[in-house]
Image (cartoon, rainbow, N blue to C red):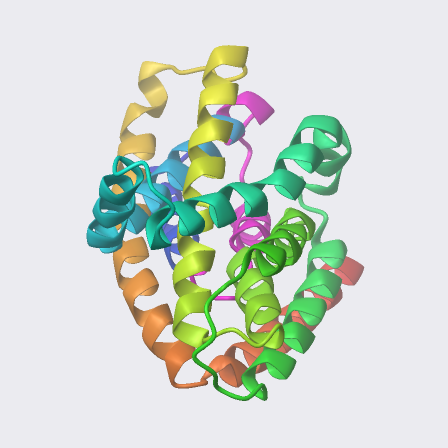
Amino acid sequence: METTDAIVLGIIQGLTEFLPVSSSGHLELGKAILGDKSVPEESLLFTVVLHFATALSTIVVFRKDIYRIIKGLFVFKKNEETIFSLNIIISMIPAVIVGLFFEEQLEKLFGSNIMFVGFMLLITAVLLWFADKAKSTRKPVSSSNSLVIGIAQAIAMLPGISRSGATISTSVLLGNDKTKAARFSFLMVIPLIIGKIAKDLLGGDLTFSSENSIPLAVGFIAAFISGLFACTWMISLVKKSKLTYFAVYCIFVGLLAIIFGLIK
């Protein structure tokens, strides 16, 4: 992979991981447009590195929240932190089940399946539009809500369905506070990303060569920096009910992807 391609894909991952426009879908589109010729093992390693970069940017942005949650857990009492942590665990269950039992089926949907990505982006647009019209509340995310949001996150493993868009939209449509919905959406994915990276490392699915070190490094830096910006910006946008703009964007890109798929 060329260094410039790595930078472009890193920025795409960093921005779209947090903006509700599907990072997996945009990465597939980016690879198709750039004519990525990476072998599957190298492509997987690059994707894992980019996801680690965005997970790290999430940890940096929410470092105070994470510290408070960890500190609260060591009190060993039922408090706000333990309830939040329990909700995070509940939200992970659907994605873990899908990841363990349907990984091969999911992988078949990746690999420049541009038309599928386009249709999924249109579904993301519909979710964002309805969420933007929802009334503002101050309701926190409950345990029952966490499971439903977790199901939305599992569905968002499909390329083209925005994870942040699906989880935030679902949370808001359930009547939760928009800022709390965004916070929960970004924090709930950290354990899953770390778990996926550990699984790939222990499974020996990743291959590294010195030739890839520079593209991996610049891709990581690009994803991390753009992720810091996008994460902070997204929280502000959700609070101000600006999701309709992303719905329009998803419709535009989705239609372009479908057309591109037909031509190709």
Nearer to us in this view, 184 or 35: 184
Asked whether residue 17 is in view, the answer is no
Asked whether residue 243 is in view, the answer is yes
Residue at 80%, 61% (x, y): give it: 262
Q: Position of residue 70 (x, y in %)?
A: 27, 40
Nearer to us in this view, 254 or 57: 57
The image quadrant that residue 11 belongs to is bottom left
Residue at 31%, 71% (x, y): give it: 233
Quarter holding the C terminus is bottom right
Number of numbered markers: 0
Nearer to us in this view, 51 or 165: 165
Q: Is residue 8 left or right of residue 65?
A: right
Residue extending farthest front: 77
Region in magenta = 16-43
Does 220 appear in magenta?
no
Q: Position of residue 117 (x, y in %)?
A: 69, 56
Q: Is residue 98 left or right of residue 6?
A: right
Does 31 appear in magenta?
yes
Residue at 29%, 46% (x, y): give it: 69
Q: Identify whether 138 is placed above or below 213.
A: below
Q: Position of residue 54 (x, y in %)?
A: 35, 46
Nearer to us in this view, 159 or 215: 159
The image quadrant that residue 72 belongs to is top left
Q: Identify whether 231 is placed above or below 76.
A: below
Q: Position of residue 169 (x, y in %)?
A: 58, 70
Quarter holding the N terminus is top left
Could you tell me what secondary structure mostly forms the magenta stretch? helix
